[in-house]
Image (tube, coloured by chain):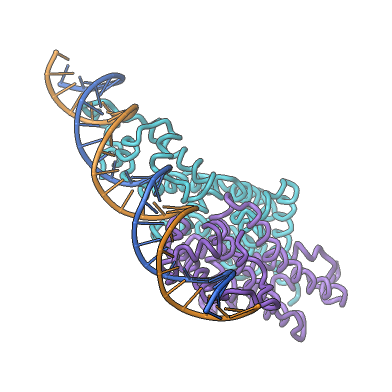
Chain colours: A purple, B cyan, C orange, D blue
DNA sequence: CATTTACTAAACGCTTTCGTACATTAATAA
DNA sequence: TTATTAATGTACGAAAGCGTTTAGTAAATG
């Protein structure tokens, strides 16, 4: 709605007046995240956010239009960080087992983070107001990760390291085993973050089960 | 805070005045659930709930004290339904494979239901305000289910149908494989409910992987 | 009957938030 | 310099919700 929300053509064409301060923009988004984490959507108000961000209320309106737009922008910013992390998932360690374990390690580190939980909750709380947000995040997050993992498995099948199987299903199974009840638990505030050792064990055991179950035909 | 909220000693000692109407109580809780499902915590207001329940605002206060108490009561009522379902999980089908598949079927049917998703979201949205709620639900829900499943597996180990292993971990793995990305997806509104066939396949394949991975020592 | 309790409807004062408007200051380009 | 845009602070009217009060009706017991 506002010009300031659109892409930075200001970078190419230096506009006339005082340039917008990107720090303000970021401060507002940060404040939104922080306030959300400290109390859900109910606690989110433009006035509160402006106060927390050390910014005028009017500035918030100028940048994001309204509260919905602000939440949308915050989630999308978070998504950017998120997909960046997922792009860095290691897929080329020597050996299938190591590849999977390293993949799982980086992934679970992320899935256990506060940022992830926050974003997840925000999306859920916005599901009814902005129905397109859920599918977007779901596609770029879980689905993309699963497909990437499925590619690794498919490649292993091609090399003969695994028997032929539905790789997408198997990828989902592995993701499920890694997460277990933790994602759900963190989400509802029911269980604390697993410590590194527990997490590592869960990752390795998940890989172990998968490798054993989909091992190349023994003598079937 | 209110006498009406305490246990029904009225059943034993018929009190003096007009008896409270349990239908009102239920109507309020139902309205709360409905309104929550249609828009998250933000949309919840005492006045709106009273309106939707066809009940006076004062009656809501008389029954539940305040909004927090109302949400708390709603979640706990939901919990009662929930644990009742979990108690009905079949654990005695003939044969391990059938037992697990039937267990998974009933469980996933429940985990895919709107009621479950609603409750899950409510708990998550209350995590900061009522921190004890999350652990309570988590303990009686996911943890209890996992332990019940672990018992089945331990019994199978005792009979020699499975090799010795960490049954709790294995139970969590199986639960994870069954759920895959679905619980997360439903939660954030990212993916639609899986159809019965897909669900059945996911359950069976999960069981298959587990049975193969923890099969009795082949010739190790 | 009188008493006691549940419930309703309407109104109350209070607070919070919304989104907008106005006047002012800050920073930058022409 | 002047023109232009960013940002601030304050104030405003409108709306909505909170939690309470009051007066009255409905349903049960003694």
Q: Residue furthest bottom?
A: A94
Eyeballing the image, is A178 above or below B205?
below
**Residue A60 location (% of width, % of height):** 50, 64
Image check: B7 left or right of A123? left
The quadrant holding residue A164 is bottom right
Q: Residue at x 72, y 46 (%)?
A: B196
The quadrant holding residue B22 is top left
| Count of all numbered marks drawn on residues in the image | 0
The quadrant holding residue A217 is bottom right
Q: Residue at x 72, y 50 (%)?
A: B200
**Residue B182 location (% of width, % of height):** 65, 56
**Residue B218 location (% of width, % of height):** 75, 71
Does any portion of residue A85 appear in the rendered image?
A: no
Eyeballing the image, is B22 above or below B174?
above
Image check: B164 left or right of D13? right
**Residue A17 location (% of width, % of height):** 58, 74
Image check: B72 left or right of A182? left
Q: Residue at x 59, y 47 (%)?
A: B110
Image check: B28 left or right of B9? right
Does any portion of residue A125 appear in the rendered image?
A: yes
Q: Quadrant of the C terminus of chain A?
A: bottom right
Q: Residue at x 30, y 41 (%)?
A: B5
């Amino acid at each position: 709605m506002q010009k300031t929300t659109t892409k930075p053509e200001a970078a190419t064409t230096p506009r006339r007046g005082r340039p917008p301060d990107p720090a303000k923009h970021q401060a507002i988004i940060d404040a939104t995240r922080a306030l959300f984490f400290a109390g859900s959507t109910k606690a989110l108000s433009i006035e509160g956010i402006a106060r927390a961000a050390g910014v005028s209320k009017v500035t918030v309106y100028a940048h994001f239009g309204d509260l919905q737009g602000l939440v949308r922008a915050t989630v999308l910013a978070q998504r950017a960080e998120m997909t960046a992390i997922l792009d860095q998932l290691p897929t080329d360690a020597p050996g299938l087992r190591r590849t999977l374990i390293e993949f799982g390690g980086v992934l679970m580190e992320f899935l256990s983070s506060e940022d992830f939980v926050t974003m997840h909750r925000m999306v859920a709380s916005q599901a009814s107001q902005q129905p397109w947000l859920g599918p977007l995040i779901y596609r770029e997050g879980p689905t993309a990760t699963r497909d990437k993992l499925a590619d690794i498995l498919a490649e292993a099948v091609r090399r003969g390291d695994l028997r032929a199987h539905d790789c997408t299903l198997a990828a989902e199974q592995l993701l499920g085993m890694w997460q277990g009840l933790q994602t759900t638990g963190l989400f509802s505030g029911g269980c604390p973050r697993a410590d590194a050792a527990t997490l590592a064990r869960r990752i390795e055991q998940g890989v172990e089960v998968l490798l054993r179950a989909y091992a190349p035909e023994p003598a079937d």
